[in-house]
Image (tube, grey):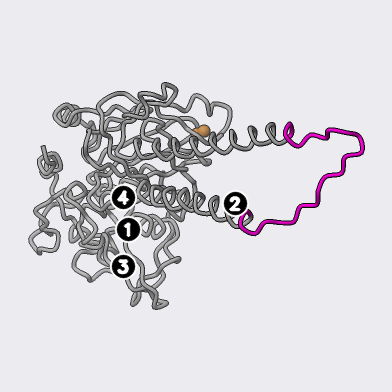
Amino acid sequence: MIIASWMPFLPDEASSVSAEVDALYTYLVIITIFFSTLIFVSIVYFAIKYRRRSKNEIPAKINESKALEITWTVIPFLLAMTMFVWGSSLYFKEYYIPKNAEDIYVVAKQWMWKFQHPEGQREINELHIPVGRKIKLIMASEDVIHSFFVPAFRLKEDVVPGPKRYSMLSFEATRPGRYHLFCAEYCGTNHAGMIGWVNVMRPEEYESWLSGGAAEGSMAASGEKMFQDLGCVTCHRADAQGRGPVLQGLFGKTQTLANGETVIADENYIRESILDPQAKVVSNFQPIMPNFKGQISEEQLLQLVAYIKSLGGPGATASTLSNPGGEMSSPQMNQSSGAPNTSAPQSNAVKSTPSTERSAPNESRPK
Ligand code: CUA
């Protein structure tokens, strides 16, 4: 706030890290100005003071000065270390993903930003978020490298295509307003047009915006439907009788793999296991899952991730659970009628969340 007010060319400070980024930049600028001035003034001063006064003047021989050499090595070293320590600690603070953040799913493509909230709302080139709450963006690219950049938040993260991982970014907006969103990685003809707005709203405004209606139900519900349609439910059964691992309560759990390694079942693991199932096979299971690369879009993939998250687990938070009551592992859940699924007569064993829970995520949010 303070720094941006006397540096008019800086964008608004609208996130919890903006002020600190500006402070660090100011520090760098001040040091740069100080040393540039010192060096240029010294050059001019010495050039005049030690100029050659007569044609046959021969300067005195100068031996090195240990004290001087040590001084001008140690001081810049210490200064550089302050930049390093400050800069890296701020970097870690900016790119740390807190556990209790609220998810928003992002798909970048030539040339637009598509957002989907867990509650189901979709947006293009507009993102609505509440002020004062931690947000986590789970981002995928459908084609080339893009970069999510909000100058007012002082945050930028590349969105990279490929089966291995999602790009994640977390932030907390501190001031309601409308802030420019850019793509900061040249991604083709209309790269410059790949822009949008982040609308930071007061919590009550956000809640009413959010309840404004999602045409198709929550992301977890869409994901669940796909889980049925793709036949995933045939093998990933809740009763542990299936040929694939049980997904209920999985999210955030440590999985032991066939090769003895362990992996935490996070968004990236789920993504990779769908696109490239043989990459990390859970111990005591056969590598028989077909791979779904090219068969589902990034958006569908995110819905599946949201669905698996909604099944609970140590890494699931209230905002990701579609049924915060958490009855996923109870046997009664098997009763709801299954979606049409010709390949799996017993598929209703996995059906965990009746459609009535779709209003739950709103209720679980702190007001
Ligand atoms: Cu997308 Cu540049």
Residue 263 location in percent, x, y? 36, 67
Identify which amino acid the numbered label 2 is placed on.
Answer: Trp
First in residue order: circle 4 vs circle 1: 1
Residue ID for mark 4: 304
First in residue order: circle 2 vs circle 1: 2
Query: Which residue shows up at 38% across the image and 47% down it?
Result: 90
Which mark is on residue 257? none
Identify which amino acid the numbered label 4 is placed on.
Answer: Leu
- Disc 4 under 8 Å from ligand 1? The reply is no
- Element carrying mark 4: helix
Segment tinted magenta in the rendering? 47-68
Label 1 crowd bin: few (<14), some (14–19), many (20+), radius 10 Å: some
In this rendering, position of residue 44 left or right of residue 349: right
Answer whether residue 58 is magenta in the image: yes
Residue ID for mark 3: 244
Residues marked 3 and 2 touching at CB (< 8 Å): no
Residue 133 location in percent, x, y? 22, 40
